[in-house]
Image (cartoon, rainbow, N blue to C red):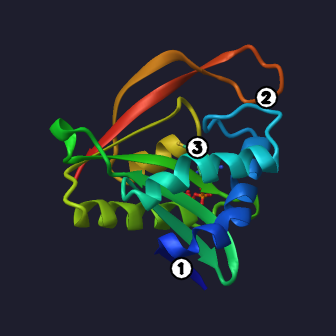
Amino acid sequence: MMSVTELRKNDLSEALPALAKILQACVASGASVGFVEPFSIADSEAFWKDQVFPEVIAGRRVLMLARDGRHLAGTVQLITGMLPNQLHRGEVSKLLVHPDFRRRGIARLLMLALMERAEKAGKSLLTLDTRTGDMAEPLYGSLGFEVAGSIPDYCRSPEVNSTSLDATTYMYKIL
Ligand SMILES: CC(C)(COP(=O)(O)OP(=O)(O)OC[C@H]1O[C@@H](n2cnc3c(N)ncnc32)[C@H](O)[C@@H]1OP(=O)(O)O)[C@@H](O)C(=O)NCCC(=O)NCCS
């Protein structure tokens, strides 16, 4: 049975190993989500521990998890802590589904839960960026996100020693 929940502050450390595995597996399978190979489990754990958890604890970020029974299958974040002139905006970050759990509607479920949570937080605008041409682009489109535009040479391809640069597409949705 699939369930999507918001991770509570007290449960962060328990979820760390599974979160680290999901991100590491996504990067290893070619996802462009901020990191380049080589990217180890230890690198992945450090990202969650040092950059994500403190923001969740500070209440500036919401971390959602999708579980298939006892397995952690996917995750997404909503960045809520914005500067004073854009408190109505939320940013979608790190939508990740473990390669073993793809094409079962988990990303869609995570995004629907995130959009509901964003509305509850009083957000009226969501923004995100995703590598141009990735499979996430049609997914966001089907959830009502509009393309704002594309920026060339935005980020390095994740493969080891790659020097090629990929474009990113900025998208937004008015809630
Ligand atoms: C992108 C990602 C989150 C999709 O997760 P998922 O759980 O497999 O997605 P869903 O099953 O909810 O698919 C929803 C829709 O997305 C699109 N989609 C997802 N994977 C696709 C694929 N491999 N090829 C084409 N379309 C795809 C389809 O429109 C799909 O709807 P459908 O199955 O009814 O045709 C997942 O592939 C992933 O984690 N990729 C690596 C990380 C990443 O790139 N994240 C996005 C960062 S912006």
Is the Cβ of the residue at disc 1 closer than 8 Å to that at disc 2?
A: no
The relative height of residue 151 versus residue 139 in the rendered view (above or below) is above
* Residue pointed to by mark 1: 3
Q: Amino acid at mark 1?
A: Ser
25 and 105: which one is in front?
Answer: 25
Residue at horizontal 19 percent and vertical 59 percent from the top: 122
Number of residues whose C-alpha sits closer than 10 Å to that of mark 1, classed few (under 14), some (14–19) or many (20 or more):
some
> Is residue 96 toward the left or the right of residue 58 in the image?
right
Residue 175: assigned label? none
Mark 3 vs ligand 1: CB under 8 Å? yes
The relative height of residue 32 versus residue 123 in the rendered view (above or below) is above
* Residue pointed to by mark 2: 159
Q: Earlier in the sequence, mark 3 or mark 1?
A: 1
Residue 90 percent location from the top left of the image? 31, 48
Q: What is the C-alpha distance between the residues marked 2 and 3?
A: 18 Å
* Residue pointed to by mark 3: 135
